[in-house]
Amino acid sequence: MLLDIEGIFMNDLPVFLKILIGLVLFGWGYYRYRQVIKPDKVGFHKFNFLYKFQRNAFIYALMACGLIMVMRELVILIWF
């Protein structure tokens, strides 16, 4: 059948789960960005450089990985 909507969505359930996980990762990263990086007025100096660099890198990695997961799965879902 050409319009077997239930079959299409049930076969692509892992795709939707990956999209959901990607959105959660991006949302968590954005939440941490708004809570931690945005109000930080001090900036970097030699006493807190390593800590702040690791913290900011983790937050940006969360956002990037979430966005990459969502975009990859959407391209696969739409293209194929």
Image (cartoon, grey):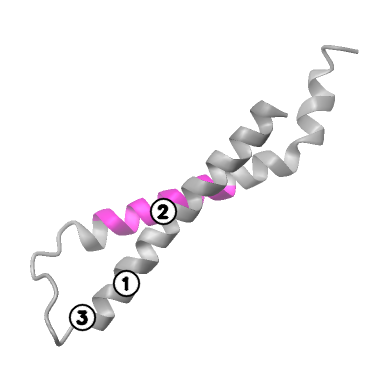
The single residue placed furthest to the bottom in the displayed view is 47
Please identify the quarter of the rendering in which residue 14 is found: top right
Residue count near mark 2 (Cα–Cα under 10 Å), binned few <14, some 14–19, many ≥20:
many
Residue at 80 percent across and 33 percent down: it is: 10
* SS type, badge 1: helix
Residue 37 is left or right of residue 72, and the answer is left
User: Residue tagged by mark 3?
Assistant: 49
Q: Position of residue 26 (x, y in %)?
A: 44, 50
In the rendered image, which quarter is residue 38 located in?
A: bottom left
Task: Give the percent coordinates (x, y) of residue 33.
Answer: 29, 56
Q: Residue at x 39, y 67 (%)?
A: 58
Q: Given the image, on which type of amino acid does mark 1 rest? A: Arg
Region rendered in magenta: 21-34
Q: Earlier in the sequence, mark 2 or mark 1?
A: 1
Which residue is identified by label 1? 55
Residue 63, label in figure: 2
Q: Amino acid at mark 3?
A: Phe
Q: Is residue 11 left or right of 75 when viewed as pictured?
A: right
